[in-house]
Image (spheres, rainbow, N blue to C red):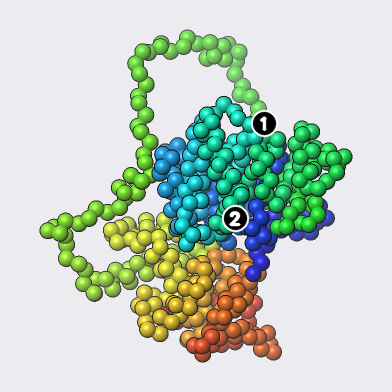
């Protein structure tokens, strides 16, 4: 299944897209002077690919933390954690497949390099079982892979450069697709830049950068001056995931905005000159010899996680285990909370991390804070809920085979398969493209059709169209089949067809 990430339009007005699967195998280099739209390009790419692949952003200026509200990224403020805890966090990010933003704002150059290297190292060294596909975006990459030694120590530079080299040279086999962005190609280490096969080159003015950009795109040196004429948001693209020949494109709009917006012109405040003099030249406050308050030591991430873990109960004072009736009542209450969340209009399109946060808050309000499921269990509950299954139905013997078959699919597709399986078991109309898209968490009907095709290619279902264009889906070997229904039915009709019986 090919996934095309829409980036904007070509200079000819056609849609410009990136082949995501090809990008995961070949890596990307973005170059552009300050103000060329480089960060806007990265934001567009991250937003469009967020539903499809896990992401991590190494963010030296805190520009991308706003992705958390819209797409559920976990923001890690590197200033608050040690290098060791960030290394462990990097490992856990891959194991649990959580999209993250490593915010390095507030750190000096050397500590930015050390903490970024620790985090990248943790992601790189996880066991083979956790080598899931992942986009790793490094903004201002020349800070972490400098071409020449700067003011930082040699140790910090070697750690950071080694982590960046691992990402770009050896990351592909581990599922890590490096996307590096830089203002100056001449300041970026050549062995890091040379591993990219896809290029997006924006506006630049220095001859050495223009010449190097032209070389990477296979353009003649006399054509290099064209990079000076590019407008903000315009880029020249080349690479197997983009175009086989240099192609001009303009990046489309984004859903989120950077926290640090560009300054805008505004009128000066009206103030009399004498008033301004009195304010500006007022006597300074008296100096004090007292020491400033000592800043509390940065909390360690591992300590925070251990503190959040409930203590082992004392055998003598421990309460008796809950009865079967109490467990059933607890499951029903948790299911009811989750159903209420999913009943909200935009719930189907919110990231799992955002849904989990709201679920935890509602559980605490209901007095269930002590029994809130872990994120892994919440994912399974969400899969069942999106399929319209309660905990009691999911435990039924008839669904054990369905659960085993669903486990053959990626986790984010299992809910769609179980929704189709339930419709087939009950003989309900086949879910429409709109219903499948909603269950998958996307507005794109094309993705819904691709998803159905993918599940069929795995040998789990068979899709058929009758003479009227109505679709029937049959589960392989189970002989369950949905009733024929129009795949282009609107969302309301689709939901009515799939929810005619309570879960």
Q: Quadrant of residue 16?
A: bottom right
Q: Is residue 305 left or right of residue 230?
A: left
Q: Residues within 10 Å of mark 2 (few under 14, many from 20)?
A: some
Q: Earlier in the sequence, mark 1 or mark 2?
A: 2
For residue 342, above or below residue 267: below
Residue 305: x and y, percent? 35, 49
User: Residue 387: x and y, percent?
Assistant: 47, 74
Do we see residue 374 in this rendering? yes
Q: Residue furthest left?
A: 316
Q: Does residue 95 lie above or below 43 as drawn?
A: below
465 with respect to 10 (left or right): left
- Where residue 227 appears, x then y in whole percent? 79, 40
User: What residue appears at the point 78 percent right and 57 percent down from the top-left corner?
Assistant: 244
> Residue 172 got which mark?
2
Q: CA distance from mark 1 to mark 2?
A: 45 Å
Q: Quadrant of the N terminus?
A: bottom right
Frontmost residue, 219 versus 363: 219
Task: Provide the secondary structure element on which disc 2 rests.
Answer: helix
Across and down, in percent, residue 193 comes to 67, 44
* Number of the label disc, if any, that sits on residue 265: 1
Q: Nearer the viewer, mark 1 or mark 2?
A: 2
Question: Looking at the image, can residue 229 be seen?
Answer: no
Secondary structure beneath dot 1 equals loop
**Residue 74 to residue 261: above or below:** below
Is 499 placed above or below 249 here?
below
């Amino acid at each position: 299944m090919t996934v095309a990430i829409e980036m904007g339009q070509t200079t000819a007005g056609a849609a410009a897209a990136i082949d995501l699967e090809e990008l995961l195998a070949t890596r990307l280099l973005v170059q552009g002077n300050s103000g060329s739209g480089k960060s806007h390009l990265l934001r567009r790419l991250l937003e469009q690919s967020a539903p499809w692949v896990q992401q991590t952003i190494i963010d030296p200026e805190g520009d991308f933390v706003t992705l958390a509200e819209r797409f559920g990224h976990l923001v890690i403020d590197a200033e608050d954690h040690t290098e060791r805890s960030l290394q462990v966090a990097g490992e856990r990010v891959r194991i649990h497949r959580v999209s993250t933003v490593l915010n390095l704002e507030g750190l000096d150059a050397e500590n930015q390099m050390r903490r970024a290297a620790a985090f990248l190292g943790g992601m790189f060294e996880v066991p083979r079982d956790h080598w899931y596909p992942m986009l790793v975006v490094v903004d201002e990459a020349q800070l972490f892979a400098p071409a020449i030694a700067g003011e930082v120590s040699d140790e910090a530079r070697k750690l950071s450069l080694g982590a960046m080299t691992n990402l770009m040279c050896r990351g592909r086999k581990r599922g890590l697709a490096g996307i590096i962005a830089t203002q100056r190609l001449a300041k970026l280490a050549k062995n890091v830049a040379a591993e990219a096969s896809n290029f997006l080159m924006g506006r630049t003015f220095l001859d050495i950068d223009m010449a190097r950009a032209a070389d990477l795109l296979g353009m003649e040196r006399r054509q290099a001056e064209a990079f000076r004429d590019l407008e903000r948001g315009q880029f020249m693209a080349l690479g197997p995931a983009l175009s086989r020949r240099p192609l001009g494109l303009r990046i489309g709009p984004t859903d989120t905005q950077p926290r640090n917006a560009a300054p805008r012109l505004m009128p000066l405040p009206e103030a009399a000159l004498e008033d301004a003099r009195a304010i500006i030249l007022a006597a300074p406050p008296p100096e004090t010899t007292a020491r400033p308050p000592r800043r509390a030591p940065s909390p360690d991430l591992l300590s925070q996680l251990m503190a959040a873990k409930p203590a082992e109960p004392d055998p003598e004072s421990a309460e008796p285990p809950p009865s079967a009736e109490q467990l059933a009542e607890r499951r029903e209450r948790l299911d009811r909370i989750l159903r209420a969340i999913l009943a909200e209009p935009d719930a189907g399109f919110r990231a799992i991390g955002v849904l989990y946060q709201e679920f935890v808050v509602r559980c605490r309000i209901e007095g269930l804070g002590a029994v809130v499921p872990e994120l892994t269990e919440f994912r399974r509950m969400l899969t069942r809920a999106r399929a319209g299954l309660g905990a009691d139905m999911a435990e039924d013997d008839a669904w054990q085979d369905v659960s085993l078959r669903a486990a053959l699919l990626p986790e984010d597709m299992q809910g769609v398969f179980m929704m189709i399986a339930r419709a087939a078991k009950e003989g309900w109309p086949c879910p429409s493209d709109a219903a499948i898209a909603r269950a998958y968490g996307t507005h794109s009907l094309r993705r819904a059709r691709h998803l159905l095709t993918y599940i069929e290619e795995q040998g789990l279902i068979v899709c058929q169209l009758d003479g009227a264009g109505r679709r029937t889906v049959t589960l392989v070997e189970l002989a369950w089949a949905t009733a024929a229904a129009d795949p282009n039915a609107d969302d309301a009709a689709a939901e009515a067809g799939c929810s005619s019986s309570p879960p």
